[in-house]
Amino acid sequence: MGSTLTADLRRDLITSSFSVETVGRLWGEEAAAALFRGQRLPALRALARRRADGLPFTRAEALAALFVLNEPLDRAEVDRALPQLGSAGAEALGLVGDAPSGQLDGRLDGKLRALLDLRPYSFVDTLGAGSWWILSDLGELALGHPLSEDHVLGIGGASTTLSGLMISSPVDSALDLGTGCGIQALHASRHARRVVATDISERALWLAGLNAELNAVDNIEFRLGSLFEPVLDERFDQIVSNPPFVITPRREGVPLYEYRDGGLVGDALVQTVIREAGEHLTPGGTAQLLGNWEYHVASADSGLDRVRGWIEPTGLDAWVIERELQDAALYAETWIRDGGTRPGTRQFDELYEAWLDDFDSRHVTRVGFGYVLLRAPLAGTGGRLARYETLHGGWGDNPAGLGEYFQAALEGHDWQATLGDAGLLTSVVTYASDVTEERHYWPGQENPTVMTLRQGSGFARTVSLDTALAALVGACDGDLTLGQLCGAIAHLLEVEEAVLIDDVLPRIRKLIDDGFLLPLK
């Protein structure tokens, strides 16, 4: 029965053109921006003007009003918007239900309201453009009150960040740990032959399964359980996880939201995922996750040093990037508001005090947020990768394409790590297509005073250049080996070749690690 209803819903969504592009045009850019900020009034006014002009809703407009703006509709309007499924089918699927009777001067009497959030989602990855429809629980804006503890979150900033970071090279098996509404499992299904998605929430698994069915994805298996318990004896080529990493007080009266709270003290949840990931990776397999880590006033170590301490005993390769750092008070405010509790209320102040007490008990001053990439090493790939970086802002907030960047940078690292200096000098490298060079001159001067290499993708890194390195990178067009280029540049600059090589070769290795230079294959 469910499969038939879901298939009917899919056909209705396709034929109504219920897409990101269509919905975005319904109320205009300004209203769409306001909606993104959590304000739906401009979009509601735009649709109200259409009503006032006597124009009936198109099917896409009706679906957007119902599921995106959470406006109740007459049953007949729902039937018109969903001709295959019908209002009865939508009720049977749990998508809609009767609006509360007698409210707002009877305006809602006899109308249906959305019980779930349903909206289109589009993306671009290394396999091309794609789009899905994603079901999740209604947010605080629609509910008008704080979220329930079993709330299943839709697509937010963290989920789009992780999907953008995801390496999408073809693999046989992938694990989505803590799948939520299933968005990471859906992304992994595009490049993995099979996907296992786990969660501690039965409701999350129900919605994730419904999303897979709605989007005709049939290579995902859903399993109930905490962390790696559902896959105790299994290994995967890829693990992705947006785990419930939010640091939450373990005090009576503090809501524990399943979608963000792992039930452990402090940052122990992220520590557990990191320490156990290696036991479930095939050789060469990767794990990518988001996480928080604490900074303790009594420790000389930074939060990244804490993460290093978790990873080093595992023997895994690691690339960890701290993206953001918040003081303890701001962190508490952020996540209390995320649960739907408003500042200025007694409940907010009580939760705020609980959070600050919890941080004080462990001498926590700040909390870091970032990306963790782990890899089970393969024999013959050179030395162990151990990169721990702080990249706070300065490169934008769009993670799209970072998965491709990570893949290219890892391949470059593995390639050059197996080569001694002599082998590297006999190799040919080229500069990446997104790399540009900037030169600045004092007025009237022939020689530049500042030269900078810029990366257009990835983390938009910049590297200062001197004359030798600028000449070398500029000549890396795939024709000559690095050794030949070093010899020619040494002759041109009238310096000893051995001295120039000792100077530039370590920096060439760093440019390869960072994706500025690519090995010619």
Image (cartoon, rainbow, N blue to C red):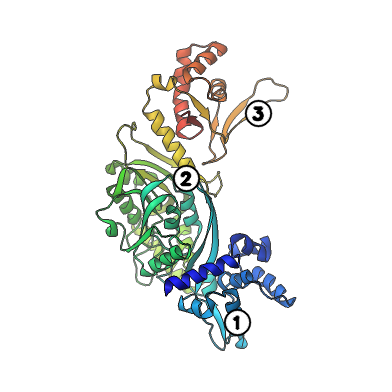
Q: Nearer the viewer, residue 512 or 334?
A: 512
Q: Earlier in the sequence, mark 1 or mark 3?
A: 1
Q: Quadrant of residue 492?
A: top right
> Around disc 2, counting alpha carbons within 10 Å, would you say few (fewer than 14), some (14 to 19), or many (20 or more)?
many
Q: Taking 383 as reference, is 158 left or right?
A: right
- Which is more foreground, mark 2 or mark 3? 2
Q: As displayed, is residue 513 above or below residue 370?
A: above
Q: CA distance from mark 1 to mark 3?
A: 67 Å
The residue at the point 60 percent across, 64 percent down is 17
Q: CA distance from mark 1 to mark 2?
A: 45 Å
Residue 455 occupies quadrant: top right
Residue type at mark 3: give it: His
Q: Which label belongs to residue 403?
A: 2
Disc sitting over residue 433 in the figure = none
Question: Which of the marked residues, 1 or 2, is nearer the chain's N terminus?
Answer: 1
Please tell me how crowded label 3 is: few (under 14), some (14-19), or many (20+) other residues with Cα within 10 Å.
few
Q: Is residue 75 visible?
A: yes
Residue denoted by label 3? 440
Q: Element type at marker 1?
A: helix
Q: Nearer the viewer, mark 1 or mark 3?
A: 1
Q: Amino acid at mark 2?
A: Gly
